[in-house]
Image (spheres, rainbow, N blue to C red):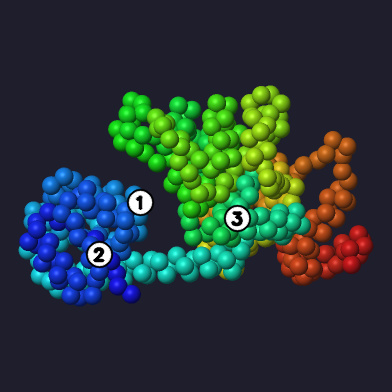
Amino acid sequence: MKHTVLLIDDDDSLRRVTEYNLSSHGFSVIAASSGKEGLALFADHSPDLLVSDVKLGDINGLDLMETIKADAPDIPVIIITAFGSIEMAVKAMHKGAFNFITKPFDRDTLILSCEKALELKGLRSRSRMLAHEVDRLTGTRGIVSASSAMKELLETASRAAGSEATVLISGESGTGKEVLARLIHNNSPRKDGPMVAVNCAAIPTTLIESELFGHVKGAFTGAVKDRKGHFTTASGGTLFLDEIGELAVDVQVKLLRAVQERQVQPVGAEQSRSVDIRIIAATNLDLQDRIASGDFREDLYYRLSVIPLFIPPLRERPEDIPALVTHFLKKYHAPADVRFSKDALDALSAYHWPGNIREMQNIVERCIILRSGRKIEAGDLNLPGQQAQSSPLNPVIPDEGISLEEVEKAYVTKALEKAGQNRSEAARLLKIPRHVLLYRLEKYGLH
């Protein structure tokens, strides 16, 4: 298959020679004598490679490259110039050029550079294809689902992925709403298109409409050129609107139209533009409460929640905690012999997890970094609000009192558990002779 090269140079003689050299080597060449003509040919032909001079009559070659890469970020670009300098070369590379060639150059130098650029493009394309295949085969990459609630959620999400229906994901902060949204996108027919994530709460109210729908040059002070909004950028793929409940009511009206009709009107534009997107929204707020208070439109809620998905908080699914610990130990490359003790896992299961998965991830990472041995104990967790644990140096006595016999029995039991029921090891932990431990086992009926 012939690769198409877009050649832009305002030097007629050099352009013809370069076009001949590229064509004779098997490339399909489309040539332009100006930046404006080059942009038109790019839009019509979608070339595989761009070769451009820096000094064009109407547009600077580096600015032209930036414009083209905004629409086709993967296209390799070779910059040629008669006025080369180290500063210009560095600038070209920072802007995304594959190579920078100074005139005069020989035919073989240009041909070799073109071949290397297209080879790299092919490798990147194959890498993405492999990544998509891994996502397809692994399905739920990034989501741990030991509990029945999470397994049921993932089954529903998997069925939803194959449709074009709008999805509304709700759940507390840190439960993994964006991870679930990406899973749906990566298992959908749109997986080869972009997934654009927008945090609605992070955008100032005055800019949200422009950010979502774009604007035209001169629409407002500071609008010095046309700008695509996130709806247009996500065309062909998925738009993920996080924290949707934070949107102002007046923006919700325009969002409703965009969701219903898949059309957007950039700020300052007279005409609407069609967009081909799938919308996934997420919120950590109770939208029914927001509707009741007049802060969220009911019609928009029903448009967004065609398929509602709720991620339960971590405190409601303690069965997932051991699997999550294992997952994060692998993620942060902990040595294979590092593990959490039973007491540590029990403490994690009893914790209320206000930060959900995000908080657990931080705690496991911290424990890996600060650990003093291979086993991470409950005392190493340093959970926020963690109450003092009973110890020989810091005994905790309940208000109703406790017998010394109960304390001794509890410590003997804990020592056996920690030692894996090995009596010699339990005796060593309690710092007593083995025969004394055997007596205590007999006394308390702990056989």
Residue at image point 53% right, 57% down: 190
Q: Earlier in the sequence, mark 1 or mark 2?
A: 2
Depth order, front residue of 327/271 = 271
User: Dot 2: what SS?
Assistant: strand
In the picture, the disc for residue 71 is 1
For discs 3 and 2, the disc positioned in front in the rendered view: 2
> Percent from the top left, x then y, of residue 293?
69, 24
Quadrant containing the C terminus is: bottom right
Please indicate whether residue 416 sits to the left or right of residue 26 in the image.
right
| Residue type marked 3 | Ile
Classed neighbour count for the residue bearing mark 3: other residues with Cα under 10 Å, few (<14), some (14–19), many (≥20): many
User: Dot 1: what SS?
Assistant: helix
Residue at image point 86% right, 48% down: 404
| Residue type marked 1 | Asp
User: Dot 3: what SS?
Assistant: helix
Q: How many tags in the picture?
A: 3
Answer yes or no: do the residues labelled 1 and 3 have beta carbons within 8 Å? Answer: no
Q: Is residue 165 above or below residue 99?
A: above
Q: Earlier in the sequence, mark 1 or mark 3?
A: 1
Residue that badge 3 annotates: 184
Q: Which picture quadrant has residue 367? A: bottom right
Residue that badge 2 annotates: 5
In the picture, the disc for residue 222 is none
Q: Earlier in the sequence, mark 3 or mark 2?
A: 2
| Residue type marked 2 | Val
Q: Which picture quadrant has residue 79? A: bottom left
> Percent from the top left, x then y, of residue 375?
63, 61
